[in-house]
Amino acid sequence: MKVINEQIKTGEFQSVYLLYGEEEYLKKQYRDKLKKAISGDDTMNYSYFEGNKIVVKEVIDMANTLPFFAEKRLIIIENSGFFKSSQEELADFIKNMPDYLIFVFVESEVDKRNKVYKAVSTAGYICEMKQQSTSVLVQWIVTLLKNEGKTIDRPAVDLLLSKTGAGMDLIYAEVEKLVSYCIDRPQITAEDVEAVCTTQTTSRIFDMITAIATKKQKQALDLYYDLLLLKEPPMRILYLLARQFNGILQVKESLMRGNANAQIAREMGVAPFIVGKYAAQAKYFESAQIKEALRDFAETEEAVKTGKIEDKLGVELMIIKYSQK
């Protein structure tokens, strides 16, 4: 990201950029920064393509169109899937792009063996937008609030992150709510966060697993019923439970190998504070028990798909089984 910031400052751009990864906020921010710096308000020499049904020939035809009264033509392509499928024509074009053309690709996932990826890595700049570390998120929150004339203490920041997770879009939205709520005073407290910030589904799942781990069955079931009232589909809840249990297993086994939380976070591609949450829950489970739960979750999913059990009941039975004393 520092490279892009420097190029924006100097006005010397690569011919092609690939912004990819799970941090949607950063991808949007840098997509928009590049657009503003390269084309500004010029709509005649700017094109946008989005989705997995983009026709490569149409992109290349547009790319071969000379810019009109401008030095550069900018084409932004988003969520195309080009970096996970065979697109030899596009890969070959990127290797011999016109000097006036700049591509910006924005993708969630890429295959580094892909020909388009390799072409971009040779001809341009690739930036992975990962989840940010806890320290970066804390400083970012403090800066956002400082720009609004507000301050916040560390307990309040920690509570905010426990509710939102590491997604910067969600954090930004909750910070905006806090600013509006505390419009008549400068200090934001943990009480303010508790009053106005929404606990996201993934955070509720964390709480549910903690309740399961500590054998607080009523609390675990109450959290499940709360999610149902919020219109969360039972099978999505089951998927999130399985994903969290899988994360707990990864952290538990990595800790047993002597790895530190920071290293585990890098390997898993998550923020360190999430690893800390997994580690706290891992103490309550044996690896064999987690693996058994993952098998049970898979079997429950299959039973629901084949009509052997109703989805709401199937998930409820899993929660009951693993929260029994």
Image (cartoon, rainbow, N blue to C red):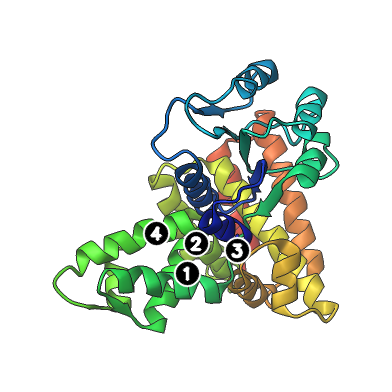
Q: CA distance from mark 1 to mark 2?
A: 7 Å
Mark 2 element type: helix
Q: CA distance from mark 4 to mark 1?
A: 14 Å
Mark 4 element type: helix
Front: mark 2 or 4: 4
Q: Disc 1 residue type?
A: Ser
Q: Disc 4 residue type?
A: Tyr
Mark 1 element type: helix
* Circle 2 residues within 10 Å: few <14, some 14–19, many ≥20: some
Q: Is residue 27 visible?
A: yes
Near-viewer residue (204 or 292): 204
Q: Counting residues from the N terminus, which is met first, the one under dot 1 or under dot 2? A: 1
Q: Which residue is mark 1?
A: 162
Q: CA distance from mark 2 to mark 4?
A: 17 Å
Q: Is residue 55 above or below residue 52?
A: above
Q: Counting residues from the N terminus, which is met first, the one under dot 4 or under dot 1? A: 1
Q: Quadrant of the C terminus?
A: bottom right
Residue 113 locus on image (x, y percent):
86, 42
Q: CA distance from mark 2 to mark 3?
A: 31 Å
Residue 127 locus on image (x, y percent):
67, 53
Q: Which residue is mark 4?
A: 172
Q: Is residue 74 left or right of residue 247?
A: left
Q: Which residue reaches farthest left?
A: 184
The part of the image, by quadrant, that contains residue 44 is: top left
Residue 76, label in figure: none
Front: mark 3 or 4: 3
Residue 232 locus on image (x, y percent):
47, 43
Residue at coordinates 46% horizontally, 75% vertically from top-left?
A: 139
Residue 203, label in figure: 2
Q: Are marks 1 and 2 in contact (CB under 8 Å)?
A: yes
Q: Which residue is mark 3?
A: 2
